[in-house]
Image: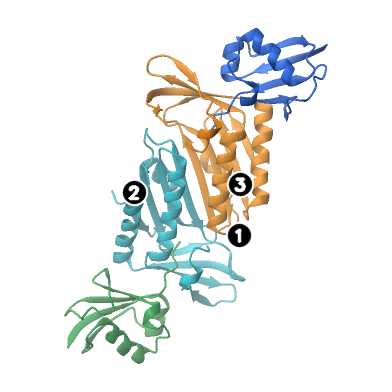
Chain colours: A orange, B cyan, C green, D blue
Amino acid sequence: MKRFQLSDTPIRIEPLRDSLCHQTAGAFASFEGWVRDHNEGRVVLGLHYEAYVALAEKEGERIVEEAMRRFDIVEARCVHRIGELRIGELAVWVGVSAAHRGAAFDACRHIIDEVKSRVPIWKQERYREGDMGWLHPAAAAAGKD
Amino acid sequence: MKRFQLSDTPIRIEPLRDSLCHQTAGAFASFEGWVRDHNEGRVVLGLHYEAYVALAEKEGERIVEEAMRRFDIVEARCVHRIGELRIGELAVWVGVSAAHRGAAFDACRHIIDEVKSRVPIWKQERYREGDMGWLHPAAAAAGKD
Amino acid sequence: MAAVTVLYFASLRDAAGVASERIESDAIDLQGLFAQLQSRHGFAWPADRLRVAIDGEFAHWEDGLREGSEIAFIPPVSGG
Amino acid sequence: MAAVTVLYFASLRDAAGVASERIESDAIDLQGLFAQLQSRHGFAWPADRLRVAIDGEFAHWEDGLREGSEIAFIPPVSGG
């Protein structure tokens, strides 16, 4: 089973969450990134995620596997959408199960932080005024969203 | 709408999660506590949660309202089961939506930490050997599970 | 003397053998009431490991007994 | 001379006007290849703001060009 996946169709949360259930796991932490209707003062109508698929899948898998080794957790998975998304749609999902909650929270946060900074996926926002823009955040701004 | 609830029937996650969606929210963090099949070296077959309902509802609501003021979040909710639970069942759910992920994670973790330490709910475990035990953790052990 | 209802939870209820009882007490405060009930029921908990509530709100051990009030002794909690 | 395929993503693709192109280059390393393509397409990004990959794995700017390989210039990412 791949622990990181790209999806060009809407992410279905329930089967992902259920795949992390285990009798030894007492804690589950998850993160979802939703498409917001604004960014840096501009009204956003929708967006497009593009990926360098071959490398994104490898790098995403490495991130989740690193988390499996680094934290005392039972299971972890991440799915990232690509393609066109509407406001409110689920862009990325991370879930982690563990015996105890500290490790579940820490691993979940670590995975989303690393995915956002390392996986070759780019967001193109479509604005109310009709123009579009690629987001290429400077390293200094990492960790903000 | 109450932001904290006790439930004597299985918690349905999807409507809770959906109630936190907001167009300004780009991040969502959630925590789930699941019934484990063991605790402190003993095999657990199931458990029972008892609450001092009147005070638990008030204290739980205070915790979530405090989080709404203290963190830069959009919405937050928590539901805790009472009654008989089987292994793997969902015992507590916390969800937080926010513009950015840092506040969502921090508020979610704060709420579950406070609920576990302040809300008058008690867990009675039923063991393989047939005996049962109430859990009354010492303050020093808080934050472990 | 004040007549109050006392609620017990979890292992404290197991020790008392009842979930609640109506009692009359001449204790001057909640600390004194707990000492009386502790000797009657043989509670293992010292008061400083418990919290106390009156009428559904947390209270202080130094608070007096109000006629007709509902008093709960709250052992360490274990939700979540 | 090495013949390689170059992939462009996001704003880099917009600047190049193509998603990929096959080119022959005498650059000794990836840094040199990027400099050639930068002057051809007018990329605004300096190399030190980008990462580079060969055949689906991250590489170093000092790596040489392998005949037939696929090279990707990766602008700052914005997933999540």
**Viewer-nearest residue: A134 or C24:** A134
The answer to whether D14 appears left or right of B134 in the picture is right
Check chain identity for marks 1 and 3: say if they share one.
yes
Q: CA distance from mark 3 to mark 2?
A: 29 Å
Q: Quadrant of residue C34?
A: bottom left
Question: Badge 2: few (under 14), some or many (20 or more) residues near its Cα, within 10 Å?
Answer: some
Q: CA distance from mark 2 to mark 1?
A: 32 Å
Q: State the image coordinates of residue C11 (x, y, percent, origin top left).
A: 42, 78
Whether residue B10 can be seen here: no
Which element is circle 3 on?
strand
**Which chain letter matches label 2?**
B
Judge depth for marks 1 and 3 and give the one in front.
3
Q: Quadrant of residue C1?
A: bottom left
Whether residue A88 can be seen here: yes
Q: Amino acid at mark 3?
A: Ala
Q: Specify the quadrant that holds the C terminus of chain C.
A: bottom left
Label 2, on which residue? B68
Residue for point 43% across, 35% down: B26
The answer to whether A93 appears left or right of A73 in the picture is left
Q: Amino acid at mark 1?
A: Thr
**Viewer-nearest residue: B92 or D10:** D10
Question: Badge 3: few (under 14), some or many (20 or more) residues near its Cα, within 10 Å?
Answer: many
Q: State the image coordinates of residue A108 (x, y, percent, origin top left).
A: 55, 46
Do the numbered discs 1 and 3 sit on residues whose CB atoms are within 8 Å?
Answer: no
Judge depth for marks 2 and 1 and give the one in front.
2
Task: Indicate which disc, 1 or 3, sits on the residue closer to the N terminus.
Answer: 1
Label 3, on which residue? A76
Residue for point 37% across, 18% down: A128
Label 1, on which residue? A24
